[in-house]
Amino acid sequence: MNAPLRRLALAVMVLFGLLLLNVNYLQVVRANSLRNDPTNPRVIFEEYSRQRGPILVGGRPVANSVATKDRLKYKRVYPLGPLYAPATGFYSLIYGASGIESAENSILAGTDDSLFVRRVIDQLTGEQVRGGSVQLTLNARAQKAAYDGLHGRRGAVVAIDPSTGAILALVTSPSYDPTLLASHDTQAVSKAYQQLNKDPNKPMLNRALRQTYAPGSTFKLVTAAAALESGRFQRDTPVFNGPKLDLPQTTVSLPNFDNRPCNLFGKTATLEDALRRSCNAAFGKVGLDLGAVALRRQAEKFGMNAVVDTPIPSVRSRFPANLDQPQTAQSAIGQFDVRATPLQMAMVVAAIANRGVLMKPFLVQEVRGPDLSVLSRTRPRELSTAISPRTADTLGQMMVTVVEKGTGTNAQISGIQVAGKTGTAQQGGNRKPHAWFVSFAPVNDPKVAVAVVLEDGGGAAEVSGNKLAAPIAKAVMLAVLGR
């Protein structure tokens, strides 16, 4: 054999060896990831040949599969599409899955290891293989109250059971109908997806979990918690009472929202006065007294700077590091580079309501097989002890004064004591501030903690957390409490 033929034979052998390595790599190393990849066309066609399990709220399907007459045997439908889209996500032939459709795909598709015995039995008996069901923690009345309250305005609402971490409402607005992306008409799906993606209002963005905002004055709860935990402050400790705080190392000042002293009727103001009237100057000074490290440490005890898996993962809420003094003062009132998801601020309030214990938020209540046997139930789990019970009780009572005679009076509920905090978060340029409200109720036996944010003040001429966000929080609390 001459040299050219030997080289050709050697090249063929090398290529053949590489082909064998690739086949083994795909079949052994990547087999599991390919099998569970929701964008793998083979997986998708196989999944469409069986009935995908439902996603349930209160025992009723908010996503289920119906039989078709085309080559794909089942089609996904969402009876109350936009209302539950932030939780369900979508299940698409060409765009894969999102939300719970993605996070619980193996259960819904019937491919999960926990369903192996069921699949074998179905195959032996000739029964059709079906997917399992996923029961969500959402409260249908609270979900609708939140959705109706936002009324198409850009924003989000999250409600949590403080004692367990169960998510009772998860709403973002504007929303979209996942059924549009579940069609078997790929051209129609592609057109719908492109339209949703180009919409400047971003209807597919899960604002509750995947968008961060400056929390504004709602973050004063974290600063107040750090102050009380330090042992240097009590609710009646005098704080700075000036109309504005001149920041060190700069010519910038931090004014109160009305440019007036915190206590209008005396020479001194207390920490409770500062929270009740939401005084920027006072809390800026408290932040300076505590220092950036103490504020960051307290923020992280409430869950900031970490991802929360519900199992839909959140983005990280952020309290920045290496702050100078002016930045520390601004961060103490939820400005500068402090950013929080609505879920995060609901977690802050839930921890206060739960006497300082922060429970891990979760969206899946239980998972059942196609034969309705329970495969798993979520057990409540503690994330951290954010603050002491004493601090939580004190801070909760301070929040009551906000609602009863402070900046949050629109959250009052007859016969029920409500704890709350308003917030407006300034933005750059000519944009209007975000409007916030966070709360929990009843104070003596908390059943629900709520966070509401309206982007750019919901387009209102006058932006006020009390005017815009508090009524939504009130409606959600009433829904949970059955009022």
Image: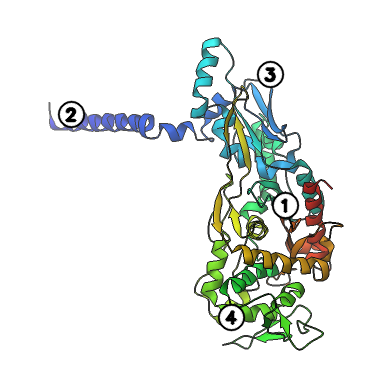
**Mark 1 → mark 2, Cα distance in angstroms:** 78 Å
Task: Please state the horizontal and vertical placement of residue 378, each as a whole percent of the image.
Answer: 58, 40
Q: Earlier in the sequence, mark 1 or mark 2?
A: 2
The answer to whether 138 is drawn above or below residue 428 in the figure is: above
Q: Is residue 182 left or right of residue 414?
A: left
Quadrant containing the N terminus in the rendered view: top left
Residue 418 point in image, percent of width and height: 78, 60
From mark 4 to mark 1, how far is it between C-alphas?
A: 33 Å
- Helix, strand or loop status at disc 4: helix
Q: Nearer the viewer, mark 4 or mark 1?
A: 1
Mark 2 Cα-neighbour bin, 10 Å: few <14, some 14–19, many ≥20: few
In the picture of the structure, the residue carrying the numbered disc 3 is 69
Q: Which residue is mark 4?
A: 288
Q: Earlier in the sequence, mark 2 or mark 4?
A: 2
Q: Residue at x 69, y 75 (%)?
A: 235
- Amino acid under disc 2: Leu
* Mark 3 or 1, closer to the camera: 1
User: Considering depth in this image, is 445 or 84 the residue closer to the camera?
Assistant: 445
Q: Are marks 3 and 1 in contact (CB under 8 Å)?
A: no
The type of residue carrying mark 3 is Lys
Disc marking residue 5: 2
Question: Where is residue 417 drawn, in percent x and y?
Answer: 80, 60
Question: Which quarter of the picture shows residue 176?
Answer: top right
Secondary element type, mark 2: helix
Q: Which mark is residue 448?
A: 1
Find the residue positioned furthest to the top.
Answer: 125
Q: Amino acid at mark 4?
A: Leu
- Earlier in the chain: of badge 3 and badge 1, it is 3
Of the numbered discs 3 and 2, the one sitting upstream in the chain is 2
Q: Looking at the image, do the residues carrying marks 1 and 2 touch, with CB atoms under 8 Å apart?
A: no
Residue type at the position of mark 1: Val
